């Protein structure tokens, strides 16, 4: 919420009136002394000029504060300083012009008046900048709360969309096939792998960013299950240099992409699928697969990819890219280094 919207018009006017009192306090303190040296006929004009001065500062403070809070959105302090100074200088010229035209006052160029305008200029500038930083902090806190909500939503999506009955059925179906073959060694390996996959997914709600090494270890476990399920008709080619394994990526970024490969493509003896995962020169993780569309398109709502896009936007402030044609489907996932994290902080 913008800070200026938190205050009603009456509250803003009251703040302006009180602030102007402090600005013209030297004039208030000197007013009795000045009146004692004037003829009674001049008292009224002197008091009117005093109130003119006071309300002029009331209006000026209100304008500059509102301008700094509502109009100047940029973070650059220098820009704010220059603009506020120009308005203050213009206001000073207007004040001098009115004073000479109406009151013929000679103190328009006095040190007290110039000092008062400088104080108004400096205070309004810093007030605007401080409130801007305060608003920025509030926005960051709101984004953090949103991130927490998205993390919870990601965990929920992982449990409801990716670990759904269909996923369980396929996993248990692969296990059932191994049991029927009475291959105890492979069955035990499959069960252990299935356990690792579930453990990683269930713990994903407690994580935000993980290393590329962790995510690829999960893919290694998941690929074994997929290769067993599709009887080696689905294979993986992973080419990531060891020195890049420390790069960060949102947890469970690859599972929805691999799941999409299975959901949207025909995989059989005539359409052997190879999922390629490699690193580009720009340190983007590329997940690519040939396109073998099913005769009957799968009914999906795109939740997995949309959820992935949202998590990249919130966790990394970056966007994923998708390139698709009739032959190849590619997804580009930006990665974050430790250096990037220190810059963000």
Image (cartoon, helix red, strand yellow):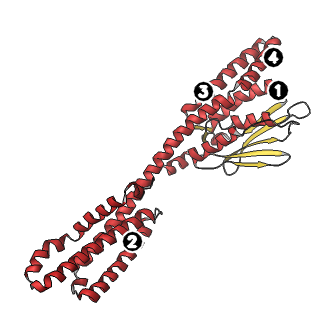
How far apart are labels 3 and 4 at the CA level?
25 Å
Q: Quadrant of residue 40?
A: bottom left
**x and y, in percent, of residue 259 in the image:** 74, 34
**Dot 2 corresponds to which residue?**
84
**Left or right relative to 136: residue 283:** right
- Binning the other alpha carbons within 10 Å of mark 4 as few (below 14), some (14 to 19) or many (20 upward) gives some
Asked whether residue 21 is in view, the answer is: yes
Q: Earlier in the sequence, mark 1 or mark 3?
A: 3
Q: Earlier in the sequence, mark 4 or mark 2?
A: 2
**Dot 3 corresponds to which residue?**
202
- The mark lying in front, picked from 4 and 2, is 2
203 vs 8, nearest the viewer: 8
Q: Quadrant of residue 227?
A: top right
Quick check: 109 above or below 122? below
- Binning the other alpha carbons within 10 Å of mark 1 as few (below 14), some (14 to 19) or many (20 upward) gives some
How far apart are labels 1 and 2 at the CA level?
69 Å
**Left or right relative to 53: residue 131:** right
Quick check: 141 above or below 40? above
**Dot 4 corresponds to which residue?**
177
**x and y, in percent, of residue 68 in the image:** 41, 65
């Amino acid at each position: 919420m913008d800070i200026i919207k938190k205050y009603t018009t009456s509250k803003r006017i009251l703040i302006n009136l009180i602030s102007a009192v402090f600005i013209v306090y030297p004039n208030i303190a000197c007013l009795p002394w000045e009146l004692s040296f004037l003829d009674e006929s001049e008292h009224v004009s002197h008091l009117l000029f005093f109130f003119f001065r006071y309300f002029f500062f009331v209006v000026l403070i209100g304008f500059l504060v509102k301008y700094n809070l509502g109009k100047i959105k940029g973070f650059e302090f220098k820009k704010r300083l220059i603009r506020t100074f120009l308005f203050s200088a213009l206001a000073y010229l207007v004040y001098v012009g009115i004073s000479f035209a109406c009151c013929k006052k000679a103190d328009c160029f006095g040190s007290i008046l110039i000092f008062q305008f400088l104080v108004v200029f400096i205070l309004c500038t810093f007030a605007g900048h401080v409130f801007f930083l305060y608003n920025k902090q509030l926005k960051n806190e709101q984004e953090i709360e949103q991130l927490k909500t998205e993390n919870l939503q990601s965990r929920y999506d992982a449990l409801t969309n990716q670990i759904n009955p269909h996923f369980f059925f396929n996993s248990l179906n692969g296990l059932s096939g191994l049991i029927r073959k009475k291959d105890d060694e492979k069955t035990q390996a499959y069960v252990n792998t299935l356990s690792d996959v579930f453990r990683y997914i269930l713990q994903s709600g407690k994580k935000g960013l993980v290393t590329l090494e962790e995510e690829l270890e999960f893919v290694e476990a998941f690929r074994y299950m997929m290769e067993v399920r599709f009887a080696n008709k689905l294979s993986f080619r992973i080419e990531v240099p060891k020195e890049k394994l420390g790069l960060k990526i949102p947890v469970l970024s690859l599972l929805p992409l691999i799941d999409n490969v299975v959901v949207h493509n025909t995989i059989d003896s005539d359409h052997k699928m190879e999922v390629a995962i490699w690193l580009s020169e720009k340190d983007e993780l590329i997940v690519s697969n040939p396109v073998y569309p099913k005769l009957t398109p799968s009914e999906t709502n795109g939740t997995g990819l949309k959820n992935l896009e949202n998590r990249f936007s919130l966790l990394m402030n970056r966007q994923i890219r998708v390139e698709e044609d009739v032959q190849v489907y590619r997804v580009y996932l930006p990665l974050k280094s430790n250096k990037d994290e220190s810059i963000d902080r």
